[in-house]
Image: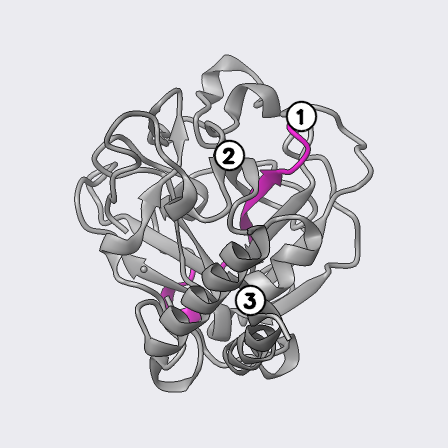
Amino acid sequence: MSLANRIAPAVAAVLCWAAFPTAARAQVVFPPDASYTALRCGAAPMRDGYQDQAGALDERDLVGDAAGPAGLRASDATNLYLRMRLDRDPAPGAAVRGFAWGMQFDLDDDPSDYELMVTVDGLAGAAGVVSIFRNLTTTLRDDPADPPDTPAVATYPFAMAARTVAAPGPTFGGNTDFFLDFAVPWSQLTPLGLDRTTTTRVWVASSSTVNGLDGDVACHDGAGGPARLGATASDQTTGDPAMDPGPGPGGTGRLEGGGGCAAGGAGGAGSPVAALAGALVLLAHRRRRR
């Protein structure tokens, strides 16, 4: 029996222990701020102006600059962690406001459409939900409001897979900014086409509906007309920011950031479980390539 075949069951056991199915998923333990890497637009950290989109203010207002990027992400062996910087808390007292926030992902190297969307919303109730959608049929080309396929592929309670925290660093509008953090498991994303090495572009936006992103779009000045996917996509990156070499010799720098899964953080970023799983996968991959 090959080494890869001997390792595969151990890898499966570790990952099955760390990645619970949707219905039984343990509360996510988010990584520290230093673990997050900024998405980039035009080789600069993702930006967005204060109150630049009429009708998308306060908790729907994405804000960001080089010192405090509007969109970031982190990863470990279990989860992809997504982070948005907003002008106000979208879930004060853990009651999610009646709007939506999300990120769309390009998986076919065509920036006029997206194939995957992850959202957070309180539209059905203050308890809130994190949802994963596919988008295999384009209805509104080059438009972030293009509705995804329904129903959602997977959903998770906000209390288990998302949070809001006060954001350090610069403030926009003279008040405290907030991070909206949400996590989705690689075990769910990989079958949908987004794994840790997948080349992708990302759109970050707020919305008044879970079926598309029609609010404030990062890397877009609302005064310049409707946002278009082709003009507001992030620079190309990888599913896992650690796999992205970055825009220059130094790679993507870690900027302000929140990772892990399983009770007590046993499956979190930097945990023995996550490290072991990653090492076993890498070793098996190298052996198969010989």
Please tell me which residue lies in front, 19 or 143.
19
Please tell me which residue lies in front, 131 or 254.
254
Please tell me which residue lies in front, 140 or 92.
140
Which quarter of the rendering shows the N terminus?
bottom right
| Residue numbers of the magenta segment | 91-110
Left or right, 223 with respect to 145, comes to left
Q: Which residue is mark 3?
A: 128
Please tell me which residue lies in front, 40 or 242.
242
Q: Is residue 169 above or below residue 125?
A: above
Q: Is residue 193 visible?
A: yes
Q: Which residue is mark 2?
A: 55
> What is the crowding at mark 1: few (fewer than 14 residues within 10 Å), some, or many (at least 20)?
some
> What is the crowding at mark 2: few (fewer than 14 residues within 10 Å), some, or many (at least 20)?
few
Q: Residue furthest top?
A: 224
- For marks 2 and 3, give the one nearer the viewer: 3
Q: Which residue is mark 1?
A: 110
